[in-house]
Amino acid sequence: MKDNFLNVNFKSEYYIPIIEGKKTQTMRVPPARWDVKEDDMVVANFKGIPNKILLQITKVGYKNFRSINDEDAKREGFSSAAELKHVLEEIYTTYTLREYNRLYYYQFVVAGELDIVVEWLELSILLWRLPVLLL
């Protein structure tokens, strides 16, 4: 278990879809890749929103840009692969997305919001350090 969790950034428009479980995946280009594995926890930050969300990573993988499908779009909160590809091209303007460019995907579930996150973080740190305190 980690004392520190990776902080990840999302656009504010994704706060509600994530909380409601409509967005359960995010895709990132290689320079924006997250250093996480399944079952890791990350803290999601949203521009302009003080609330944070604790996310548990359920799956990590990669695929080519051309392989994005409607199932990916649904997990991302979009109606079609074409819509998701268009949004990704708008987000990553400094990184030209071509058919064979690799994208990393991270599937997740909401583990808590800020007040729960703080309590959970304090508890996890206490449990992590407990064996040391008993020595």
Image (cartoon, grey):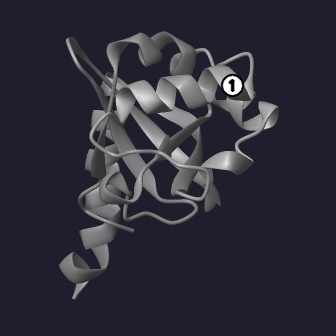
| 11 in relation to 93, above or below | above
In this view, the residue in front, 23 or 78, is 78
- Give the crowd class for mark 1: few <14, some 14-19, many >=20 residues within 10 Å: some
Rendering coords of residue 41 (x, y %): 43, 52
Snapshot quadrant of residue 126: bottom left
- Give the residue drawn at x 60%, y 14%: 20
Q: Can you give x and y, in whole percent of width and height, for residue 65 in the image? A: 61, 48
Q: Is residue 29 above or below residue 88?
A: below
- Whether residue 93 can be seen here: yes
Instruction: Report the residue at 30% width, 80% height from top.
Output: 131
Residue sitting nearer the eye, 2 or 90? 90
Task: Name the quadrant of the N terminus.
Answer: bottom left
Q: Nearer the viewer, residue 8 or 112?
A: 8
Amino acid beneath label 1: Ala
Q: Residue 60, can we see it?
A: no
* Quadrant (top left, top right, bottom left, bottom right) of the C terminus: bottom left
Coordinates of residue 88 in the picture (x, y in percent): 48, 32
Residue at which label 1 appears: 82
Residue 62 in picture, x, y percent from top left: 60, 60
Q: How many marks?
A: 1
Q: Residue at x 37, y 65 (%)?
A: 35
Mark 1: secondary structure: helix
Q: Quadrant of residue 7?
A: top left
Using residue 95 as the reference point, say whether residue 84 is left or right of it.
right
Q: Residue at x 58, y 42 (%)?
A: 108
Work out whether 86 lies above or below 30.
Answer: above
Report the side of 28 relative to 115 (left or right): right
User: Relative to residue 76, is residue 37 drawn left or right?
Assistant: left
